[in-house]
Amino acid sequence: MSLDAETVKRVARLARLRVEENEIPGLQAELNGILGWVEQLQSVDTEGVEPLAGGNPGGASLPWREDRVSDGGKVDEVLANAPDREGDYFGVPKVVE
């Protein structure tokens, strides 16, 4: 399948994209390339391949962790790269308007 310049203009209008006349040939080549990849994918034999409903093909359940509130207990690690520190907090300059 190959798109002509008029089809590219129509697609751009439907997508509400402003395309200058001198950009049409480049856009036409890009869209034709994309359609070529789609045609290539359509030629792949998928007979016997089950469709996936998600990213977990084996159906394995993921481990759950206990849902509890925690402060993390990593104050020193969190503040290790802070430019200024005041106790267990980030030190910031006072701003008064």
Image (cartoon, rainbow, N blue to C red):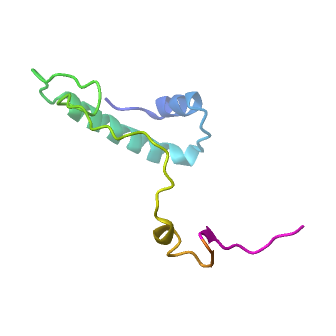
Q: Residue 50 versus residue 62: which sits nearer the camera? A: 62
Q: Residue 48 versus residue 10: which sits nearer the camera? A: 48
Residue at 47% across / 57% down in the picture? Answer: 72
Residue at 57% across / 75% down in the picture? Answer: 82
Q: Is residue 39 above or below residue 47?
A: below
Image coords of residue 31 (percent x, y): 40, 39
Left or right of residue 94: residue 49: left
| Quarter occupied by residue 84 | bottom right
| Quarter occupied by residue 85 | bottom right
Residue at 14% across / 25% down in the picture? Answer: 46
Furthest residue toward right: 97
Left or right of residue 28: residue 60: left
Q: Residue 85 versus residue 5: which sits nearer the camera? A: 85
On-image quarter of the C terminus: bottom right
On-image quarter of the N terminus: top left
Kindly report the secondary structure that dominates the magenta region of the rendered protein.
loop
Q: Residue 28 versus residue 43: which sits nearer the camera? A: 43
Image coords of residue 41 (percent x, y): 22, 33
Residue 95 belongs to magenta span? yes
Give the residues drawn in magenta, as a range: 88-97
Residue 21 belongs to magenta span? no
Residue at 62% across / 74% down in the picture? Answer: 87
Image coords of residue 94 (percent x, y): 79, 73
Q: Is residue 28 above or below residue 76?
A: above
Image coords of residue 6 (percent x, y): 50, 30
Furthest residue toward left: 48
